[in-house]
Image: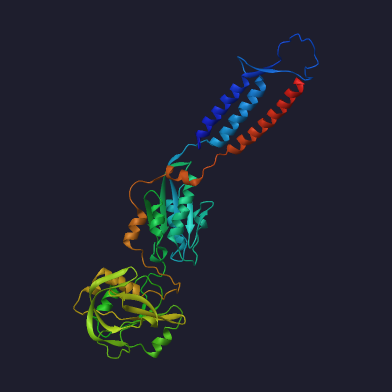
Amino acid sequence: MTWLAPGYLLWGGVAVVAVAALHLLARRRPPAEDLPTARFVPSRALHVTSRGIAPSDALLFVVRALALIAIAGAFAAPLVRRARSRVQRVIVVDESRAVSSAAELRDSVRAVLREGAVIVSFDSAARTVTPPRADSIATTDSRGSLSAAFVAAARAAGALATTADSLELVVVSPLVAEEVDDATSLVRDAWPGRARLVRVRARGADTVIRSLDVETADDALLASMRLGGASGVSAPVRVRRAQPSAVDSAWARERNHVLVHWPRSGDASNAWARRARLDTAAGVASGDAVVVAPLLRAWTLDEKAGRVVARWVDGEPAAVEHTREGGCVRDVAIDVDPASDAPLRPEFRRLTTALLAPCYGAGVLDARPAPDSMLARLAGVGRLASTDDFRSATGERSPWTSWLLAAALALLALEWAARRERRGAER
């Protein structure tokens, strides 16, 4: 047996000692003395206080001592620990729209499920699966949130704090980019140990560029896209290197359609405002994608014409997005020297992916894999999490507290009745 607040036992012992000391002060009838008159003697029982060798009113003392012990024990919160296994698992299961196959998801959960494990399923919110069975797992159409999953996993770990010494976190998910947000890293760090990542297939991770207008097969932009810059985004995309036609504009009005107008620097048919002279910029950024390289800059985009999705290193807009009913048109004023190897670099491919992403606020699936740096952080290193790391935050409760308080109330009621009976006998 352990005590969640053992300090109360010390105070209970002090209180019992104090009560015992008070019971050593006994009240007794004083000795009779001869008085010349009795007119000044009060008509009531007379007693004096004196010290005794043994506590007076033994039964009353025992009742009071037991009541104090019960109260101290209730506040100290005794907890009986059962025999614990060495390692137990918290299994986090992705039920979001990113999962390609619910059957594959259930099979993956069965492979890691063991007796006593806790299953936490999540999409946009997380919940504990009770009872923990793989058959009850099914996918939804909601976007997944790994941040919500890790918060729920830390809470669920408290249920295993009394049955295991260490906890293994297992994450069964496609681990796609749209499930990661700014809080994911911080929430993951709250789990004090490594995790095991079990990846399942993601939905909609095939090629997404439905139409690509290029004049030559050696187009540098085409090479960047074929190297993976557009993989994993489920929105239909058209890329036009020349001026878009009326058919393209009509197509861009369809739900979730993305028309990307990405002209070359020498395109004379482009209606954009041309810069006074062609120059180069040292870099460009779109979200987390940053490219540092000499890039050709021939056009000037109007920042007020739409939402800026990329900027040059000096702050000028490099790409602007215009909403078109259900879809959008994205104007990209970034070009590269055909002799440059910049489009083949990983950072340029990430930039291409960002510029071919779904329209802002479209809510379509972005099934690109999460960055390798994020996956490494999710997996973590070092030991498994110890259950001791969760006990202080789980609010463990003693099942004996309520019973001890009830016993204390019963003893106090008995003490009150015994005290009344004693006073009646003295009269």
Q: How is the image coloured?
A: rainbow
Q: Is residue 263 left or right of residue 197?
A: left
Q: How many marks?
A: 0
Q: Is residue 268 above or below residue 129?
A: below
Image point (49%, 46%), residue name: 394
Q: Is residue 240 left or right of residue 15?
A: left
Q: Quadrant of the C terminus?
A: top right
Image point (38%, 58%), residue name: 185
Q: Is residue 270 left or right of residue 421?
A: left
The percent coordinates of residue 273 (x first, y second) are 31, 88
Q: Name the residue furthest left.
A: 339
Q: Name the residue furthest top.
A: 34
Q: Quadrant of residue 350?
A: bottom left
Residue 116 seen in the figure: no
The percent coordinates of residue 111 (x first, y second) are 42, 52
Q: Quadrant of residue 344?
A: bottom left
Q: Is residue 146 above or below residue 393?
A: below
Q: Quadrant of residue 75?
A: top right
Q: Viewer-proximal residue, 323 or 380? A: 323
Q: Is residue 307 above or below residue 193?
A: below
The percent coordinates of residue 426 (x first, y second) are 75, 20
The percent coordinates of residue 218 (x first, y second) are 23, 80
Q: Viewer-proximal residue, 325 or 37? A: 37
Residue 274 seen in the figure: yes
